[in-house]
Image (cartoon, helix red, strand yellow):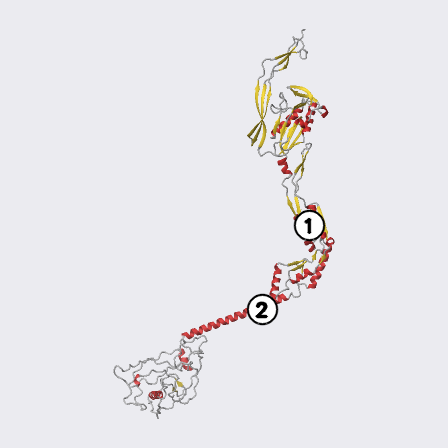
Amino acid sequence: METTSNDPIRRRRSDRYRQNGPESNGKGPLAASDPQGGVTQHPPEQTLQGAFPTQTGASAPQPRQMTQPQQLTMWDMQARQTGQMPVQPVQQPVQQQPARPMGYTQGQPLPPSYPPPGWQSRQMPPVQPQPPMQAQQQVPPGWYAQGWQPPQQQQPQPQPQQPQQAPRTRNARKGPQMALRRPAQSTRSETPQKAQKPRKAPSRPVQGHSQGSQPPQPSRKKGATRFVVLLAAAALLIAIGVVANRNHQVSVARQALAAEVHAYDDLFCQGVYVDGIHLGGMTQQEATDAVVAQATRKRDDWQVTMTFGDSAWTLNAEQLGIRVSLQQAMDSAWAQGHTGTDDERKAQMDALTVTPFVAYTSLPGADTSVADALLQEIAAAINCAPRDASVAAFNAALTDPFVFNEEQVGRTLDVETLRAQVYQMVSTMTSGTLSLEGCVSYVYPSVTVAQLRSTVVSERFTAETKISSTSTEERTANIRLAMELISGTVLHPGDVFSFNDTVGERTASRGFQTAIEYQNGEEVLGIGGGVCQASTTVYQAALQAGLEIVDRSPHGMQVGYSDYGMDATVYWSSGRKIDLKFRNNTDGDVYIKTSLVWKNKYWYTRCTIYGPALEDGVTYAFAIEKEILPAPIEEKVVQDKKGQYVTYVDEEPYVYQEAKNGLKVTSYQVKSIGGVEVERTFIDTDTYAAKQRIVYVGVTQR
């Protein structure tokens, strides 16, 4: 019996129920009961156009073509066995069903030929047993059932007899769209029969979708959002892990640092030294005992000897009153690595491994007057001002005629540096010898003896003349005496040397003897004969030493010990003087040394002049120009009335003097540099008169 309702939705569902039969849920046939008590699932089929009255004309709907079912895969068959996969819709085209008979109303029984062709029961292909699935089988494409796992191969179990499934009500909204399996000869009953309740599928369908529908396709936007969330969660977890790991490492490091630092809470740190003793690892009492014992022993044995040159000074602990003071040094040593936080202590301990701490306990006594007084005594002995070398004396009797005031190097003792070194040795109780050379600074003089010899008292020139072997002892003695009186003369700049002033008057009382001398062109005997050879030697030395010749006179005749123009005669008798003079025209003192020397079996007069060194390459020499004066042709006859040379008139005349040419000699002082004449100074013109022949004849008759 049909129940009507005023609700239009319910009426439409009721109409659909009457059209499709009691086993329909309004969307298609449902699964039919299996005679064995199970449920046979059939593939859903599309709504047939032939099941409704046909329409003609352009508005008539076109029939839908049905296709044969697709070939089932292994996943499909296994899913059908477990009830997790809906039957795929039929894809095989079916024949178009004829329209219902005209006048057919809802609830009337269909003619015997109904249902139309195509509604016959569709036989499902038998399910073949499949081999067990392996764990590595992947989820088939398109299957997104949550919690899906590959099905396990199971042996089919006999299903118990189930009561016939009751027909679904028109309010049923969910369930797989299964084809209703009916016998071909059955006809639809006017009154729907109560169908058996279908057996519940073993697996739960995907949430939000009815059983038998296609698996839902996940939204790409939701998938991307889920991926970002998962990535952020993973990054957060990694960050949390890193921070936790770092905190753990920091905690372990802090514990290790604290253990390392606090291990020395009652011990001296490594790298701490007092008086050279390593206190690392010692307690305070152990360190104090070790330092006191060593300091006391060293104090008793301590002594410092300071040396400079040949001098030495000694300082010991008793003189200084040294005492051992521990407190300050030990406190400073203990503070190393024991102050501040653990980090600060660790930094101090690490620094000690690079730069150890060194302290000393032994210090000089409070009264340092003894040490200071000794240092001042040493300074007085060492300190001196620099002094230039100078000529102390000129002793011509010596081979080296000069006596010098030696130069002196100035010295200054650095007392403060010496005091620091001594106190350091005191504080470390180090005994030994301390050389003071490193504490002395030197100031060198500007003039040395070597410089004086080469510049101030350089040998400017030495002249020599040979004494004839026919010279008498008296004459030679007069020469020696004159040379001795001249030797040692010192001329300051601008001074003029005078032979007569230096030698003095030649008298017997002064030691001169009678000897041959030249006077007015003749050889005569006189006191001091021979001194002219001494004056000639000094003249030659002075001119070639570059001194200025002031006064010089030649002999009236040529002498045997000198060339023309290079001799110098002197005379002092009866108020008449002939002198030799020259001036010191240098900027330094001039020293004259004269003597007689024996060499090569002859005596020689020697005169050396010292003074400021000549410029490099400069020399002075004689330049002589000669002019001959002819001798008279006529001879001079002298009657020897005294009979000195001839007596009788008939005797052969005695030739007293042969005729001899005269000579005019001009002398110059020539200055040369490097052998090249650069200056010529006129000295004198000597005239030697020509000599007439002289003969003596007798005046007595026989």
Q: Secondary structure at mark 1?
A: strand
Q: Where the N terminus falls, by quadrant?
A: bottom left
In this figure, which residue is indicated by the disc labeled 1? 434
Q: Is residue 111 visible?
A: no
Towards the viewer: 224 or 645: 645
Towards the viewer: 187 or 436: 436
Tally of marks: 2
Residue 662 relative to residue 312: left or right = left
Name which of mark 1 and mark 2 comes first in the sequence.
2
Residue 76 relative to residue 633: left or right = left
> How packed is label 2: few (under 14 Cα within 10 Å), some, or many (20 or more)?
few
User: Residue 586, relative to residue 364: is it above or below?
Assistant: above
In this figure, which residue is indicated by the disc labeled 2? 252
Q: Is residue 41 visible?
A: yes
Name the residue at 63% across, 64% down: 339
Quarter where residue 153 is shown: bottom left
Q: Position of residue 657 (x, y in %)?
A: 63, 15
Residue 442 relative to residue 183: left or right = right
Outermost residue toward the front in this view: 575
Q: Position of residue 185 (x, y in %)?
A: 33, 89
Residue 683: mark: none
- Amino acid type indicated by mark 1: Leu
The label nearer to you, 1 versus 2, is 1
- Between the C-alphas of marks 1 and 2, the distance is 55 Å
Name the residue at 27% across, 84% down: 55
- Amino acid type indicated by mark 2: Val
Towards the viewer: 367 or 14: 367
Quarter where residue 35 is shown: bottom left
